[in-house]
Amino acid sequence: MQLKEVSSSLSEYYDAVPYESMAFPQSAPEHLQAVAGLFGLSSPPIETARVLELGCAAGGNLLPFAARYPRARVLGIDLSSVQVEQGKALIAEMGLKNAEIRCGDLSTLARSLGTFDYIICHGVYSWVPESVRKAILRIASENLSDNGLAYVSYNTYPGWKSREIVRDAMILRGGSRELKEKLPYARGMLEYLYASARPDTVLKLALEEMRPILQNYGDYYLLHEFLEPYNAPCYFHEFVERAEANGLDYVGESETFLMFLSNYSADIAEPLLREWGSSQVSVEQYLDFVNNRGFRQTILAKKNHASGVRRQLSSDMLQSLFLSGVFVSEDGPLTPDEQPQACNLLRRGTITLSQPALKVAAAALNEAYPATLSFDALAQRVITELKLSKMAAREQLLPFVEELVIKGFLRFRMSEPDIAAVLPDRPVVLDETRATLKPPAGADAVSVSNLLHEPVYLNILEARVALLMDGSRDEEALIAGLVEDAGNGLITFLNDGAPVSELAAIEEAARKQVPIAAASLRAKGLVRRAKK
C-alpha cells in the first residue's frame, strides 16, 4: 500500500470513529517541565511556551493549555478532517486567540513548521505505520527548541505480547464487516474465549487482566486500541534507541514513581543495581519485564540538553517545588502530636504519621488541595505551629517530601498553578472553560478540563454555578443568578422527586446548593486564585 493510500485509510478510520478528545494530565507541559526539573533540567517558561501536538484530535488535550496561558502559542496537527473541524469550532467557541489546529499528514511535516518548546504526541506512535513513527521522532528532534521537551506515549512489550493474542482474536471475529459493526462481534469473541480458555494459561491470564478494560471503556477506545489497522508495540530500549538515532535522549517517564528502584523490594532492586546501576534505560527495561508493562509515556530532550540529567534528587530542587497531596486520616483530623495516625494518599498510597512536623505539613496540604503549597510555605506552617527553628523544620520535611515525591504520592510543579486554596469572595472560572459548559440535551453531567489539566465531571447544578463564576458575583449574587436560571427553565430543583415551582422554595434550594456547588468546584480544581 502506498503512503498516500495509508494516510487516506487512517483518515477515513478516524473520521468514522473520532477518538474522544480530552485532557491527559500526564502530557501537560507544566508536568513535563516539573519532571525534567526533578532531574535537574531547566525547561522553557510555560507562560510563553510554543507547544505542538502531533495527532491532536479535536484539541481536547491542547486547547485547555492555551486557555490557561494566553501568552503561549499552540498548534495541533491531525489527519482527520472531521476532528480538525471540531477543533476549529471549539477554538471559536472558547474565543482562543493563541491556538490553531490544522489538517495534515505527520509524515510530510518539515523543519519549516517552526520550533517548539514542548512537543506532545499522545496515543499516536504505536497506532500508525512505520513511516509515521519515524516522522514523529524526526519532528520531535528537528522542531524542538534546544532546551525543549518532547513527550511520546506508546504501547510496550512485554505487556502487549499476551494482549496481541486477544487483539488478533477480536480482529478475526470482526472480519470484514463495517467498522462500527465489528465491535459487538469482537466483544462476543472475548466472552467466548473467557468462558472456554483453560485456567492458568497465558490467554486466560491476559483475558483476566484485560476484561475490566474491555467491559468499562467506551467503544471509541476499544475500536482504536484493538481493532485499528496498526498497533505496533516495542520494547522500551528499542524506543530509546530510535530516539537516540534522531539526536534525542531519555529524560524520564511522565509517571516518575515507576522509575525509582527504591520503590521495589530488595530482591528486585539489588540485582539490577549491581548489574545495571549506571544505565537508567537498562534498569527500567528490566523493570518492565518484572511489571509486565504494556504502556509508556516517555519524555525526551535533545542530547546536549539531556546530558544535564541528574538521577539523584537534590535538596535545592526539592525545596523549589510546589506540592499538592491528600492525607485522609482514618481516625479524624490530623493532630500535631506524636500519636500515630494512618492516612490514605493519592494513588491509593498509605502512610502512618507520628511526627508532629509531618502531621502539620500534611494538614496544610489537605486544606489547600488541589492547590499547591511551596516547600517554604510548608516549612513556615511547621515553624509557626510548633515553634521550631527554620533548620529543624527543613530537616524534618526534606526526607518526607523526597519519599512521597519518589513514591508518586505528592504531585509537584516548578511554578504555582492558578488554583484557589480557599474559595474567593468572588470566584472565577476561566472564561474559556465556562464557554464549554454546555451539557448536551438530556445529559446529567458535563466533562471539562480543570486547571491541573485533568478531566473532571460536573453535575448540571455545578455547571450552572460555574457559568455564573465570572468574578463579578459574591455568594448572594450567585444565589440570585441560580434562582434566575431556574426561572428561565435552565435548571430545575426537586423536592421528593417533584419539581419545585414556588419562588420561596427555589430561593431556599439555591441558598442551600450554591455553597455546596462552589466548594465542589474549588475542590475539582476549577476556581482560580483571588487576585492580590
Image (cartoon, helix red, strand yellow):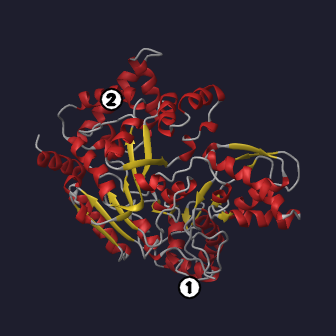
Corner quadrant of residue 231: top left
Corner quadrant of residue 155: top left
View extreme (bottom): residue:
472
- Residue at (34% x, 59% y) in the render: 53
Amino acid carrying mark 2 in the image: Gly
Say which element carries label 1: loop
Query: Residue 182, relative to residue 166: is it above or below?
Result: below
Q: Badge 2, how many Cα within 10 Å: few under 14, some, many 20+?
A: some
Say which element carries label 2: helix
Tell me the distance, in whole angstroms, between the alpha carbons under discs 1 and 2.
54 Å
Residue 178 on image: x %, y %: 19, 40
> Residue beneath label 1, please?
472
- Which residue is at the front of the view, 319 or 528? 319
> Residue beneath label 2, please?
188
Query: Residue 114, relative to residue 159: is it above or below?
Result: below
Corner quadrant of residue 373: bottom right
State whether residue 455 appears in this view: no
Which label lies toward us, 1 or 2?
1
Residue 415 on image: x %, y %: 57, 67
- Residue at (56% x, 29% y) in the render: 272
Q: Badge 1, how many Cα within 10 Å: few under 14, some, many 20+?
A: few
- Which residue is at the front of the view, 250 or 430? 250
Locate the N terminus and report the quarter of the image it occupies: top left
- Residue at (44% x, 37% y) in the render: 213
Amino acid carrying mark 1 in the image: Ser
